[in-house]
Image (cartoon, helix red, strand yellow):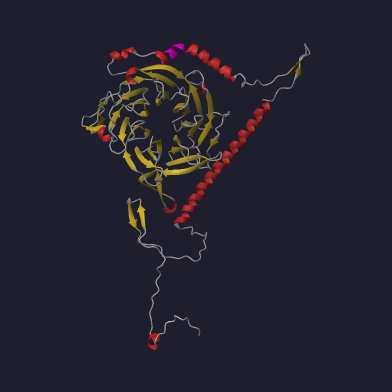
Amino acid sequence: AARSPDHLELPEAELKKEVTRTLTANNPHVPRDIVRFSFKERAYKIVDDMDQTAVHFTLNGYLIHKDSDEGRRQSIRSSTEEGSFIWYIYDTYMEELERMEKAKEKEKTKPVAKKEEKKTGRKLSYHVDSLSKVAKAAKIAERMVNLNTFDDIAQDFKYFEDASDEFRGQEGTLLPLWKFQYEKTKKLAVTAISWNPKYKDLFAVGFGSYDFMKQGHGMLLLYTLKNPSFPEYSFSSESGVMCLDFHSDHPHLLAVGFYDGNVAIYNLRKAGSQPSYKSSAMSGKHTEPVWQVKWQKDDMDNNSNFFSVSSDGRIVSWTLVKNELVHMDVIKLSADGTTMQGPEGLQLQRLGSGTSFDFHKKIDYLFLVGTEEGKIYKCSKSYSSQFLDVFEAHHMTVDSVSWNPFHLKVFISCSSDWTVKIWDHTIKTPMFVYDLGTAVGDVAWSPYSSTVFAAVTIDGQAHVFDLNINKLEPLCTQLVVTRKKNKTTHVQFNPVYPIIIVGDERGLITCLKLSPNLRKKPKVRTSCIPPTTEGLFRPCHRPLSFHTTVFKTIVWQFVWD
């Protein structure tokens, strides 16, 4: 036998000696001392149990026992997919029906054949008049007529200043200006209001119904202050419009959420009565009403995207990719400690119901979500299964939540439990609590001062606060709607002009001008503004009393000197 030159020569005793070797299942190539970050414990941990298995051959099977947990989940999932397929059939049917109706309309609008006039013998041709050639001139003429009709209101809007504010001390008033109402929306409630970011006189209004038993069609109208008698744009929808939002960089794009769970994008540059893009059952629509939509900055590929929140507990990101709405679930709100019994004893977790949300003005990933249970969740786009913080905010539904546009730590919330609360997101308890004596429909920060906000209540009143002047009571409480059994639903400040618009349950939008006492800007500091809230807030053990209600809790107040 051939031997290598360096072969070791062993004596006979060594050759006959038995050597015992123990084979183990440990893989010698597995790395040791692996460190990974634990999101649960928020610390780096050494991974003790590494997988020692080395796979040389694998073959995936597709058979699952029907009585196993996975088999039960798949059976439940297949039943829900059957329901979505029914929605797909319904959407296809409605599209085909709409196509047939459009074909009938085209046949009706065909030019009439030429007819001969019996008396003169001349041939007359009748054509459908095209309004596109005179539409611009007609619109300008209409605005000129409206300016003459509402000249006194236009003068008040531009020049009137209430001189009696000097004798009222700190209080102010709201001067009624225009009223916007459309014949087709008198039986619908104002469910959303949004100002256009580019054209400061243009605003969009959504119409629907908050009554579960009275659901029907909805409408989307766009009004301008230059023509209060008739909307600039009008769109009808099969389901009620519940929320809307203009894109800040593309002001012609308007995102809309509906009561049936769909979301849509309207392009105001394109002629047509239907949205340019709309979700469907196959593209991940919500299963319950969409309560709020918010545009976000374009993604890395310059695709427009917006977020939506619904009662089904999902917060969804919608991205416009190649003329199609692509959805992605960002987070699912879970109701703590609430589970329900599913089929065959399977435990299913119930989801929370989102009603409102708002994104931080500077920190892109940070946002707040209000729920039907009265809680406010502080969430991040980076975490889909964990909340950054939970605020036990209200005893009833959180109707609105909004970050302060000037102070990065402060946000405001209102609820049907009659209260408006102001928070610092680093503190668990509210800094200010105001009881307005009845359910609060909406609240909004002013664009000109960090201490001014307005709220509307279901008794038809509007309340304007300025914490820089009075931390305990509003500077103005004024009745906005006069009809009985009518409720104010929404309020919004104009980003430039000293006016607010208020919507009610009868489809009426009222424009009101703030008196000088209600739009005082805080003095600009010459020294550096402190970066934290420790220098801006201090505890106050004096309770806030409003409408004969005394709060016997420690609240916080601003220090502005």
Front-most of residues 516 and 387: 516
**Predominant SS along the magenta part:** helix
Answer above or below: position of 344 versus 131: below
Locate the C terminus by quadrant. top left
Inspect the magenta stretch and tell me whether residue 151 lies in it. Answer: yes
In this orientation, does residue 102 appear? Answer: yes
The image shows residue 342 at horizontal and vertical percentages of: 43, 50
483 with respect to 551 (left or right): right
- Report the magenta residues as a range: 150-157
Front-most of residues 121 and 172: 172
The image shows residue 123 at horizontal and vertical percentages of: 76, 16
Mark count: 0
The image shows residue 377 at horizontal and vertical percentages of: 36, 40
Quarter of the image for residue 354 reads top left
Farthest bottom residue in view: 12
Inspect the magenta stretch and tell me whether residue 109 lies in it. Answer: no
Residue located 50% across and 83% down the image: 2
235 with respect to 52 (left or right): right
The image shows residue 289 at horizontal and vertical percentages of: 46, 36
Residue located 67% across and 21% down the image: 128
Residue located 65% across and 28% down the image: 105
